[in-house]
Amino acid sequence: MEDVNLQNLKLKRRPSFKWILNLVLLCCFIFIGYYYFVSAPLGSKDIVVHVASKQTLTSVSIDLEKKNIVRNADVFKALVLLFKSGKEISRGDYLFPQGSSAFKVAWMLARSDHNVDPIKITFREGITNTEMANILADKLSVFRKDLFLSDERGKQGYLFPDTYFFFNLTTTDEILDEMSSNFKRRISSLDSDIKKSGHTLDEIITMASIVEREADGKDDAPVIAGILWKRIEKGMMLQADAAPITYKALGLPSEPIANPGIISIKATITPKDSPYLFYIHDKSGMVHYASTYDEHKKNIDKYLR
């Protein structure tokens, strides 16, 4: 009887197969969780990754897996969705510190924590595309000057001069999209005024690019725009120093000579009616107007000789 009880006691103490299986599965889950979510495939240095403006969460996850920043794209995508609603990822550069776990990377993307500041770039009114390209090439490491100057979206006059914030790895394509879109946004509010002016958008922008270079501030811009439009109506040459071709041919140049700002564009759309037909800039840059050619010659003698 005692032997039977002893055997029963040993059977009770012996771990069941089910309990061992559960323990093994738990260990597997812990290992998988650690491998995919906690352990960091990143090496011994920080890494910067650029998320393009049109990239989806899926494509970003695949890129991160290819770069060995996360171990599995599908698992990482699910992790990001735990931290945020929607699949939109804020574009730009992300600096992931060495040893960053999948949790850390997912949290940074979900919260738009770039860990690196964008570069502030300001383009003055009246800047040319070539001047823009030189500035961008000096500031951004992957900028392609040849693409910038050859792309149809980068047509001179239609890249709005403004202050932009670009990340170091921002692509040329993204830059063109942002700057041309900015132009369209700014000009859209002026559509009805452009139609009333009787001029096409190309004519407005080309004339505005000349006014931008010729006028000295917002007070002179509408007056000079009015003078130049009046010269065209009278069949005169524009004879604007900013566009030498206007001393050789009638009408506007074939394309804008620069990228005008909003003040010059508005002045060109709604110019000021004045009695003047001529103007000069003195040595200090001040503008002097004249209604007749004789008055114009007197201004030249007075202010430029």
Image: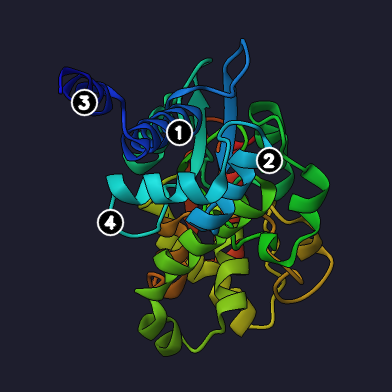
The answer to whether residue 170 shows anywhere in this view is no
- The three-letter amino acid code for the residue at tag 3 is Val
Query: In the image, is 81 to the left or to the right of 93?
Result: left
- The three-letter amino acid code for the residue at tag 4 is Ser
Q: How far apart are marks 3 and 4 (CA)?
A: 63 Å
- The three-letter amino acid code for the residue at tag 2 is Lys
Q: Residues within 10 Å of mark 4 (few under 14, many from 20)?
A: few
> Looking at the picture, does residue 68 appear above or below residue 223?
above
| Pair 2/1: label in front | 1
Disc 4: which residue: 85
| Pair 3/4: label in front | 3
Disc 2: which residue: 66
- The three-letter amino acid code for the residue at tag 1 is Cys
Q: Which of 15 and 275 is in front in this view?
A: 15
Disc 3: which residue: 4
Q: Residues within 10 Å of mark 3 (few under 14, many from 20)?
A: few
